[in-house]
Image (tube, rainbow, N blue to C red):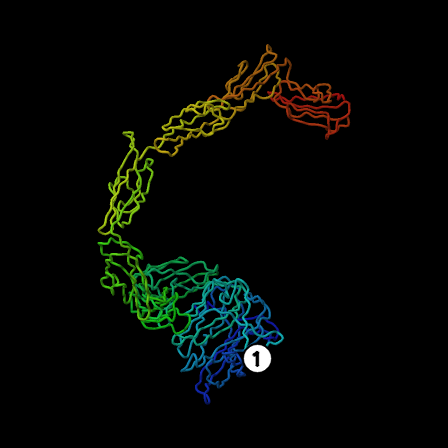
Amino acid sequence: MRKLIFFILLTLSNLPSIANHISGGELFYEYLGAGTSGTSRYRITMRLFRDCNSTGAVLANENVVIGIFNTSNQSQTNTLTLINTSIQTIQLNTATIPCLVNAPDVCFQVGLFSATIDLPNIAAGYTLSWVRCCRADGILNLSQSTGAGATFVTHIPGTSLLPTGHNSSPQFLIRDTALVCKNQTFTLNFGATDADADSLSYEFCDAYNGGTSSQPNPAPQPTLTLNFLGYQSPYSGNDPLGVAVTINPITGQITGKAPGQGRYVINVCVNEWRKGVKINEHRKDFILQVGDCDYAAADPLPQVSEPSVPQFNYEFISCKSFTVYFINNTHSAVITSYHWDFGVDTTLRDTSNLATPSYTYPDSGTFTIKLRVSGSNNCIDSNSVTIGIYPGFKGDFNVTGNCYKNPFIFADKSTTTYGTINSWRWNFGDLATLADTSRQQNTSYIYPNQGPRSATLLVTDSKGCIDTVTKPVIVRDIPYLNLPFHDTIICSIDTLQLRAQGTGIFFWTPAYNLINASDSNPYVYPKITTTYQVSLTENSCIAKDTIRVNVVDSISIYVGPDTTICSSDIITLYPFSEGLAYTWKPTIGIVSNPNIKNPAISLLFNPYVRKDTTVIYSVKATLGKCEANDQIKIRAVRYPIAIAGFDDSICYKQKINLSASILGSDFVWFPKNSLTNSNTLTPTASPQNTTTYKLTVTDTIGCPKPVSDEVIIKVIPQVIAYAGHDTNIVVNQPLQLHAEGGTNYAWTPTTGLDNPFSSDPIAILGPGIDSIRYTVRATSGPGCFGEDNVKVVVFKTSPDIFVPSGFTPNGDGKNDVLRPILVGLKGLNYFRIYNRLGQLLYTTSSVGEGWDGKFQATEQATGTFVYMAQATDYLGKTIFRKGTVVLIR
């Protein structure tokens, strides 16, 4: 079933006979033997593809005249007309593809055009080409989507590349018609065969442009000019189908996720290698048609690094692990279920119904993986692959060498658990030549010059595992020579061992008080300062370096004056001395190594006896047999103490006394602008907002560093009490009072109130009271309060609405606004003013508001106006009043 799943659709649109019926092609040759004197005979063949549905020219009428050019300067040496030898038509039977949706009509013709020619054997060799036009319109990965031409090219290597022997070009494998569906994963085996058994490697490469619509089949020109096609971003010659599609450089398999529906130009280059030298670049130029189709197909694909090489009886191999991850290489919305069988004969539990399962094999060996998928409309497809499980294979190597004039030794360190390692391919990374290769297990190479290189080993084993390892190689112009030090000091009564690292022959000079001058690590005992030079010779490469040995008769040490530090601080000592080794005693308070030149020390003030901590440190410096001593006294004193007091809260515009305590000689408060007596430890604070006061203490006797503490005084926002608007009620009618602004409330007097400590008490007043003013105290926080009052007038009538009979809106502050007076009513439904024509001039439902005698900002003239008012009393009864009012100017 696999051969029916992944297909190359090489078709073009139906265009006029300007050769846009051509879907692709390959120009190749075969060496037939020696020709006449000093020549070789070749059969040259052009394999051409044509869309069966094209209305353009037919393949039988093609006029194929190729140009033959000297590769050194691309000048024409010959032309050759190729004769049509066969035409084959291939039709894709889509009925055999399971669950195929939107099956396309796929058909094309393959034509072969051939002729023989004798060519002189020349050093540069030959370039063969045929120029044609035009490609199909609407190619999605080209910037020139219409009218782009094609040039088919191959090369015959000359005697400079092949001093002996001859060559036949590779030939790409011819597959049946092929189908690739949009946005589906696919695999195309685009391998080639080679009659000479040369090594082949594959890559995507830029396709060449060609003829034009005015000259669709031009004759070969005197000089060959090759022009690359222009690609449309994000596509390129190296990514003709986007970055999601790649080609395997060893096998030629094209894999990945197809782009959207349409045509795409693809050009594959197969590089031909013989004895590590690239002798030819062979090309196949074709158009891939991505169809608007989908299908449910089984294509089990193990997720391993490399497929098996062809000589093994399995298609894939796992060389790293017994656990293998699997996917179905055809991801389709048509698929509804999966069933995997991982091919272990000794168990029935080697199955899975997951789309992307994994399986850990119990042992090594060859296994057949089977996959069955189900699709819509009850269609089923199944397929299988074989896999070799041989983990434990790892490529590795070591390289030794220094100088470019000497051989670098490359030693294989590859390992395998199963089988044996059987092939090695070295590439030493010398870009100046193609001869920097080897197939030996352990080998050597001499680099022609210095500089960094990257060496690569491709290694295989008898089970089919392949691994590639790349390592950097540092090629120097002199041998590697390393001295751990270049300047040192010794005492005149001592002996010193010099040290050098490297590979080769060592020699030290001068011979003054020197033992073992030809050793890498000689001994010296100079009595005066001497510079010794070492030379390292590796074959003809020489490296040199020097060490200066300073000689003293004695050493000294000075630690410095006694000092004082603050408790818990760290101090580092920096003595002056020629010594190379140091010992500090006692070790108390030393928080680093007591045997280094610059120790770190931290001491703590003793709080129990309330006195300073003092330690006298002694140090001994040594240089070989010479030594010197010194000491230093370090005293640790306590930090100042600052206690700013406890955080507290006050009411708005209140004051509070701070209470601080210190241990030190001086202190300062910040900020000071809201403090009284800020030069004392008990200042009075009167902040308007919550404020953090910082107390900083210093000392002139103990630790000179300042210490700070903070106290936060939280200011409770001002309590603004609100008791409501003055109001009117009637005798024995309930009045709902309402207060705001605090969390607790107290009303005075309590006359007529049901609950004087509620924010919403109810007042009922009898006939003995004409009016009363209630005061409410609203409190919040720790005793903070505010007060407001409301006047209540008691009428000896029923609930009613009173409206004055006239008003004078002249701006004198007296009777300027006409307001309704509510008596015994809890709310105003509306108050409206009309002119004598019935036009509404003013309306409100807010108690306390009224008409100012204007309509739309225009003052109304003196006259009579009609009012209507409606309100609701505390028992829910509606009161309505209507009348007239006189406006007087």
Q: How many marks?
A: 1
Residue 652 in the image: state x and y as whole percent: 50, 24
Foreground pick, 166 / 477: 477
Looking at the picture, which amino acid does disc 1 mark?
A: Gln
Determine the residue positioned at 47% across, 69% down: 204
Place of residue 52 in the rendered image (x, y in percent of width and height, measured from the top left)? 55, 74
Q: Is residue 850 visible?
A: yes
Outermost top residue: 768
Q: Is residue 562 above or below residue 24?
A: above
Q: Position of residue 382 (x, y in %)?
A: 41, 65
The residue that label 1 is drawn on is 221
Residue situated in front as seen by the camera: 653 or 644: 644
Q: Residue furthest bottom?
A: 37
Residue 755 in sight: no
Q: Is residue 605 above or below residue 257?
A: above
Could you tell whether 439 is left or right of 31 in the image? left
Occupied quadrant, residue 825? top right
Quadrant housing the N terminus: bottom left
* Location of the C terminus (image quadrant): top right
Instruction: Assess disc 1: are there few (<14), some (14-19) or many (≥20) residues with their C-alpha within 10 Å of its C-alpha.
Output: some
Say above or below: 142 vs 196: above
* Position of residue 294 in the picture relative to residue 771 (left or right): left
Helix, strand or loop status at disc 1 = loop
